[in-house]
Image (cartoon, rainbow, N blue to C red):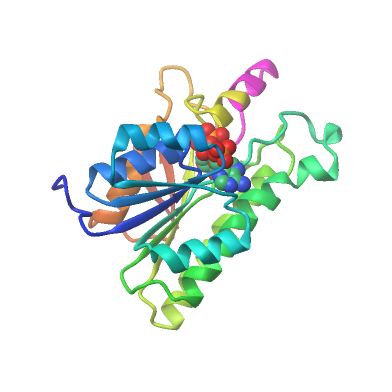
Amino acid sequence: MSDQQLAGVTALVTGASRGFGRGIATALSGAGARVVGVARDRGALAELRTEIGGSFTAVAADAADPVVAGQLMDTYRPGVLVLNAGATPLPRPIQYHTWQTFSRNWEVDVQHVFHWTREALLAPAAPGSTVITLSSGAALRGSPLSGGYAGAKAAIRWLTGYAAEESARAGLGIRFVSLLPQLTPATGLGAVFAAAYAARQSDGPAGGPAGPGCSPLTADQVGQAVTDLVTGPGPDQDAYLLTAAGLRPLT
Ligand SMILES: NC(=O)c1ccc[n+]([C@@H]2O[C@H](COP(=O)([O-])OP(=O)(O)OC[C@H]3O[C@@H](n4cnc5c(N)ncnc54)[C@H](OP(=O)(O)O)[C@@H]3O)[C@@H](O)[C@H]2O)c1
């Protein structure tokens, strides 16, 4: 792949301040895209701008706010939209959740995917655009210590599939893809759950932590996988499992 395969493309990444989002923003920028990074932590975004340089625009905002989604889609018209922002659930068994803690990932992760996906379909985004959403391996096998997380991530996979169908039906030419990464201790969210499942002496939730001898997924690998999906000829599916071994299409 040429270094500058995404030259002239604007990519917008939610949750770009740390973890996977930071890796995705860095990789897309490395491929030549102008990157708009959205998150609430101004300081972390400013650090990323120092690292990436002038091709990175930091927007400190709540990605789950529908007005933010509308304004930023109108302003930047991204050709690549990566809906990665996600809350870290409280790591505890179901009976210790309240409805508010249980539904947190619905309010943040699902709500933001809903608003931005709607904007992409209605604008509509330009033909040839790609929208990638972050579901989770937990959507396949559950995640018993994180309340409504697995259900929320399954809803994101479904929502992305519905959007792909609407795009095809209307001939919009917008590609919608969901990624289901395996749990990894490499990020703030992942470290909390890798530790919680280790403490519970479980082998973990869906797409669970890499087993003994398997290396865990890194944020750089997630960034590379997203860039490959956007630029590469690879298999064209609506959903992919993502582990340190790479992308695996889900049918
Ligand atoms: N790590 C894993 O093992 C794993 C596995 C499967 C799926 N995932 C999914 O991958 C995505 C990234 O996870 P991660 O592990 O990188 O988590 P992380 O390190 O905790 O980062 C989460 C990112 O989301 C942002 N965010 C949270 N709420 C936001 C809001 N309301 N508006 C804007 N930004 C918001 C955070 O930024 P601010 O706090 O600055 O707003 C941060 O940049 C999530 O959707 C997660 O569910 C992770």
Q: Which residues are magenta?
A: 193-207
Q: Is residue 57 above or below residue 246?
A: below
Q: Position of residue 6 (x, y in %)?
A: 23, 54
Between 123 and 82, the residue placed more toward the observer is: 123
Between 10 and 250, the residue placed more toward the observer is: 10
Residue drawn at x 57%, y 52% is 63
Residue drawn at x 39%, y 66% is 77
Residue 158 visible to the viewer: no
Q: Is residue 93 above or below residue 16?
A: above
Q: Position of residue 57 (x, y in %)?
A: 38, 48
Q: Is residue 194 magenta?
A: yes
Q: Is residue 163 above or below residue 7?
A: below
**Can you say which quadrant of the picture contains the C terminus?**
bottom left
Residue drawn at x 77%, y 43% is 102
Q: Is residue 199 magenta?
A: yes
**Location of residue 192 (image quadrant):** top right
Q: Position of residue 72 (x, y in %)?
A: 48, 61
Q: Position of residue 129 (x, y in %)?
A: 35, 66
Between 123 and 133, the residue placed more toward the observer is: 123
Say how many tags the image has.
0
Residue 208 visible to the viewer: yes
Residue drawn at x 24%, y 42% is 30
**Location of residue 148 (image quadrant):** top right
Query: Would you say 53 lies left or right of 206 here?
Result: left
Q: Is residue 97 above or below residue 173?
A: above
Query: Would you say 166 lies left or right of 151 here?
Result: left
Quadrant containing ligand 1 reads top right
Q: Farthest residue in the left direction?
A: 2
Query: Would you say 61 lies left or right of 105 here?
Result: left
Between 127 and 29, the residue placed more toward the observer is: 29
